[in-house]
Amino acid sequence: MTVVRFRQDGAVGHLILAGGPNNWVDDEFRHEIREAVHAASESDIRALLIEAEGPNFSVGGAAHEWPGKSRDWFRTFIAEIDTAYRAIEALRVPVVAAVRGLAVGGGFELALAADFLVAAENAVFWNIEINGNNVPLAGGLQRLATKIGPVKATKMAMLGEPTPVREIPELASYVVPDDELDEFAAKLATRLSQGATQALAVTRTLLKAWSIGGTAAADRLTHDLTIDLWDSPDTQAVFQSVKENHDERVKAEGPDYAGPATAPPHVIFTSR
């Protein structure tokens, strides 16, 4: 049984948790998510959508399978999960996670690896690790604190209680009715796939730099990462469209027209 698979539809890649209804983070998961992320990286997608089959995004680690395992086994297991999640963050395309039902433990941490977290109104997030004398081990705690602040992250991590998304709305980029989640997330991923992929990749990198070293760290990278975008065919196409729009408005409204000269919506981004 395949529990994680990758599928490409046009410019959008789909990383699908296919082990419903629970989508356990188990041995099969750790092997197959690595393969799925590699497949996504080697494809020509321009956006990735992480989604789940079944009523829950993921109920987290399959702790019922862990009795008798060694500490060294667990260290390697966690390291491989963490590596897969960081590989998602290292992709040069925007990532959307569509979350319904439960997102627990390592499943919650997977959702936190996305740039956009779209949550159904029934979504519940749970740092369950403290209840087993542990902590989030795949980068979840620090990423949660970045998104919702240290006060709420402390509450979630130390009390280990399931938290409905309505109590932490800042966690999600969007909260939508349950029956609209799939369509909304797919449209968002499609929109991103039609955007300025190179500039989106730079945006991801600068935000990661900021999360690690603050404004100063992002400042040190900004020019090195952004100036080369000037020579991109996409950038030059936008500038040409802006000029055409400007010339048309000057002709119609005079040189003192109000508002910016913008690129018309027919500009299509093609660079990766």
Image (cartoon, helix red, strand yellow):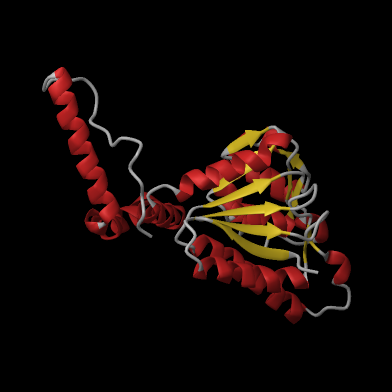
Q: Percent x, y for residue 28?
A: 76, 72
Q: Residue at x 41, y 57 (%)?
A: 205
- For the N terminus, give its image quadrant: bottom right
Q: Quadrant of residue 264?
A: top left
Residue extending farthest to the left is 255
Of residues 250 and 151, the one nearer the viewer is 250
- Is residue 219 in view from this perspective? yes
Q: Is residue 71 above or below residue 211?
A: below
Q: Which residue is at a point 59% across and 70% down the rendered structure image?
A: 83
Judge by depth and name the residue closer to the eye, 128 or 187.
Answer: 187
Q: Depth check: give the residue in front, 205 or 128.
A: 205
Locate residue 126, reporting x and y percent: 74, 48
Estimate the x, y position of residue 224 in percent, counting from the top left: 26, 60
**Who's the residue at 41% across and 56% down the image?**
201
Q: Measured along the vertical axis of the image, is residue 114 above or below residue 265?
A: below
Q: Quadrant of residue 262?
A: top left
